[in-house]
């Protein structure tokens, strides 16, 4: 597996939390054992429907030894902002720990419509100050045309980010249909490694993973992983 340097800044002037190029490189290395102790790109805080305070989430991320992750609260980046403040204070107090800290990217989960089906689209490494993201940062699901998958994906890309179809085997429509449709809209990737039956300890669901891996390969998409944490542990969904 290729090694991605998450500590050094890229050659761009973007904040590292918005470095989609580095994140793309990470996604290209993701495999079934990546989550939840090396990488985790799906987690929620009290700023949406989770139970973790962002500051406690940061403490856990460091204790677990995560290399990289994103907070993906629904329709808000408030949890990410609080986590960044905590991280900045931690670095100031522990400058010798900088090289061991996990890389935190911007993240969000947006309720959307694809093939007349409600789906969730994850956005990563985007500029949350970009005007196109404003409709998706109102702490409630978007309505009307801005809720279409085409518009959500395009907005995330315009803001410099990567768009990913969350847990593609959890919807009323088949993952075959949804992933194919999302691919035609230019989506960046799919959440391939996901624990659909919430096992303890966490493990990706074998049958669904194989199906999504096949589809992501067919459509040339990136693969991501996430625990979809809503409870008090980043190592579980609930």
Image (cartoon, helix red, strand yellow):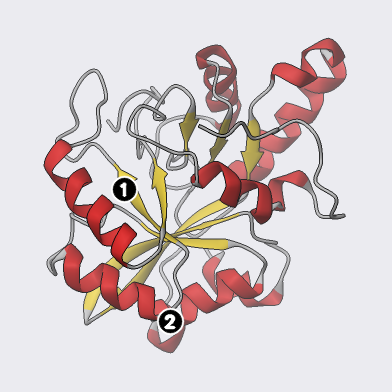
Residue ID at (41%, 68%)? 141
Give left or right: position of 27 versus 119. right
Distance between the Cα atoms at labels 1 and 2?
Answer: 21 Å
Q: Residue 150 carries which label?
A: 2
Say which quarter of the image contains residue 76. bottom right
Q: Crowdedness of circle 1 by 10 Å Cα count: few (<14), some, many (20+)?
A: many
Q: For numbered disc 1, what is the local secondary structure?
A: strand
> In the picture shown, does residue 35 fall above or below 128?
above
> In the picture shown, does residue 228 fall above or below 91?
below
Give left or right: position of 23 versus 207. right
- The one nearer the camera, 217 or 42, is 217
Residue 91: x, y in percent?
A: 81, 21
Q: Residue 192 carries which label?
A: 1
Residue 212: x, y in percent?
A: 24, 53
> In the picture shown, does residue 87 fall above or below 172?
above
Q: How many marks?
A: 2
- The one nearer the camera, 18 or 217, is 217
Give the mark nearer the N terminus: 1 vs 2. 2
Give left or right: position of 134 versus 116. right
Q: Crowdedness of circle 2 by 10 Å Cα count: few (<14), some, many (20+)?
A: some
Residue ID at (52%, 30%)? 53
Q: For numbered disc 2, what is the local secondary structure?
A: helix
Q: Locate the C terminus by quadrant.
A: top left
Residue ID at (19%, 46%)? 210
Q: Which residue lies furthest to the bottom in this view?
A: 145
Say which quarter of the image contains residue 16. top right
Residue 24: x, y in percent?
A: 58, 51
> In the picture shown, does residue 147 fall above or below 91?
below
């Amino acid at each position: 597996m290729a090694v991605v340097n998450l500590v050094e800044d890229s050659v761009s002037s973007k904040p590292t939390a918005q470095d989609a190029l580095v994140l793309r490189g990470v996604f290209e290395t993701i495999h079934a054992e990546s989550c939840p102790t090396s990488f985790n790109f799906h987690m929620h805080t009290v700023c949406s429907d989770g139970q973790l305070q962002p500051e406690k989430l940061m403490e856990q991320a460091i204790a677990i030894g995560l290399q990289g992750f994103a907070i993906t609260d629904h329709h808000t980046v408030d949890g990410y902002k609080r986590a960044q403040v905590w991280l900045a204070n931690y670095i100031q107090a522990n400058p010798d720990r900088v090289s061991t800290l996990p890389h935190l990217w911007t993240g969000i989960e947006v309720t959307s419509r694809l093939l007349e089906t409600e789906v969730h689209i994850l956005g990563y490494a985007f500029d949350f100050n970009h005007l196109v993201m404003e409709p998706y940062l109102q702490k409630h699901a978007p309505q009307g045309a801005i809720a279409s998958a085409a518009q959500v994906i395009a907005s995330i890309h315009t803001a410099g980010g990567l768009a990913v179809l969350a847990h593609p085997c959890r919807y009323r429509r088949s993952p075959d249909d949804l992933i194919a449709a999302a691919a035609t809209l230019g989506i960046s990737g799919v959440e391939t490694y996901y624990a659909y039956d919430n096992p303890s300890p966490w493990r990706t669901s074998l049958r669904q993973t194989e199906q999504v891996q096949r589809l992501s390969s067919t459509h040339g998409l990136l693969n991501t992983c996430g625990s979809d944490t809503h409870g008090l542990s980043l190592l579980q969904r609930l």
